[in-house]
Amino acid sequence: MLKSLTVWSFALLEHVEIAFGAGLNILTGETGAGKSILIDALGAVLGRRVTADAIRTGCDWLRVEAVFSVDGQAELLAYLAEQAIDCEDATLIITRQVARAGKSNVLVNGCHVTLAVLKQIGAFLVDVHGQNENLALLKEASQYELLDHESAAVADALAAYRTQYRLWNDQRKALDERKQDARDYAQRLDMLRWQDQEIESAKLQVGEDDRLDEEIRKLSHAEKISDSVQTAYGLLANDSRSGLGVLSAIAGVKKALDDVARYDDSLSNAQKMVADAEISLQEASYEIRDYGESMDFSPQRLDQLQSRMDTIDKLRKKYGATVADVLEHQANVQQELAAIENYDEDIAKLEQEIAAAEKQLRVCADALTTERKKSAAVLTKDIGAQLAALGMPKARFAIEIAPRDSFGARGADDVRMTFSANPGEAPKPLAKVASGGELSRIALAIKAVSAARDHSVPSMVFDEIDTGIGGRTAQMVAERIALVAQYKQVLCITHLPQIACMADVHLYIAKHTADGHTVTEVHRLTDAQEINEIARMASGSDVSAASLDNAREMVAHARQKKAAFAKKK
């Protein structure tokens, strides 16, 4: 529910703060005072388009702030949580500022959000009903939406249908893709078989490329390796003219330390380390000697390895960086070949699955049709009753359900609204027969019926609902709006006293000139002020005693009507 709206520098509104109440909030005032500007300002915090032209003359920016109570709005609270917007106390504060330079800033409970997010939030908060919304009734989507939100049974049947429809549709797409692939199979089969044969003929082994690289590197440097091995072994084991080998030298060190140990064991630790070193170096010399003796350099072997490596390199350039990648590519090729070769079997299986899914889809579609027909009958009766109460007792309104030849996202039904305003005329689609005034009353009748059922949006704005009506029709429209206000908070701009007298909260918009600037102000009327304003609206001239008495009678009658609506609620 909208609790308050504060506006700065928005057109004629210099600074206005309005507190709204539950039930019916009526906004009245002289023509041009700025009533529609208030609705435009509310639209700004609901995500509607606002340009710099709306900024008050002489100001650099405009700002609108709205405070909403969102207690019990589970879907909205879940969406706010997804957007990481804190709303623990069930209070939502939306602020939107637009600068003359064109920059827009939106805050929701202190969090910056995009205009797209603001529009989504706004859809949970307020339903603005104007001329555009009347025309929306003519759209097929709106007619489906009205019917499909009428009862939980329809909503459940629609959800079950859509789940099955997605499964069926996905299977059909898979079949179409399979058939499309088949057109390219002949050429692709040749390529895949050639790739498989090329890789298969190479007889690759995982890790073979690494092993070959290592052996080729060794054979390519065999001479250098042999020289280094001989040098190492000579330094360890052989004495030369230039000096002793390492093993001979360490044997001399060991003997000298053994001589010391006869007289003093202080170097026993060093003696042990030298003995250990001699053993280790002796073992190392044997290993080096054996390695040198086992070396067998073969130019032919090197040629064979390099030829094999060339084969592997060609495959790696085509199919992957390593032998493992090449073999993985072959596995994928073989898998695709198997799929192509099993094409007929796969197609048959998919067609069987589609047939089974379509059979189940038909069951779901029939269940949805059954529930829609029940809801259509209820809505047709209730909306017809509201139209009669709106001065159209002879009108015939119906929501018709007709079978379709195919399945669609909304089901296998064609839903349309038909209307006949006069006896003897066959009902025809709403778009072909309803005038603007009739369409407005049909829309109001639908709102009056759906208000008790639909609690997803707690507030509603009626903008220009009284255009072109008066007398008895105005009274009937006023009663329907009051009926809607039993279930939702309603904001309504009106020039008609019949509607104004139904107010739970009456706000008067006035403008005056100060310092050469036009300023709009909003006042909440007391009971006495409300009587005076209704008298002014009814008489169209200066208020007289008779017009005041008439206003009091209208308000008393309105209160009786609202009390009767409350009892039926």
Image (cartoon, rainbow, N blue to C red):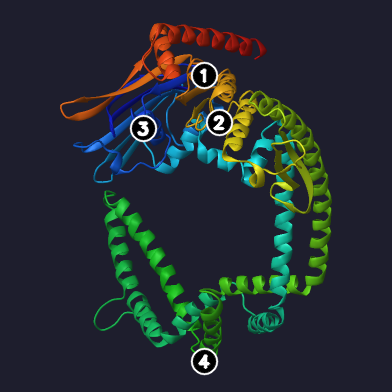
Secondary structure beneath dot 4 equals: helix
- Residue 3 in sight from this viewpoint: no
Question: Residue 267 in the image: x percent, y percent?
Answer: 27, 52
Q: Residues within 10 Å of mark 3 (few under 14, many from 20)?
A: some
Q: Nearer the viewer, mark 1 or mark 4?
A: 1
Nearest-to-viewer mark from 2 and 4: 2
Tag 3–tag 1 contact (CB < 8 Å): no
Q: Disc 2, disc 4: CB below 8 Å? A: no
Mark 3: which secondary structure?
A: helix
Q: Position of residue 323 (x, y in %)?
A: 56, 74
Query: Distance of mark 3 from mark 1, alpha carbons?
Result: 23 Å
Q: Is residue 160 shown above or below 314?
A: above
In the displayed structure image, the side of residue 22 where residue 367 appears, left or right: right
Q: Label 2, on which residue? A: 75
Q: Which residue is mark 4?
A: 303
Q: Are marks 1 and 4 in contact (CB under 8 Å)?
A: no
For badge 3, the amino acid type reads Ile
Q: Earlier in the sequence, mark 3 or mark 2?
A: 3
At horizontal 29% and vertical 67% (from top left) the residue drawn is 252
Task: State the residue position of label 3.
Answer: 37
Residue identified by numbered label 1: 498
> For this view, does 147 lie left or right of residue 459?
right
2, 313: nearer the viewer: 2
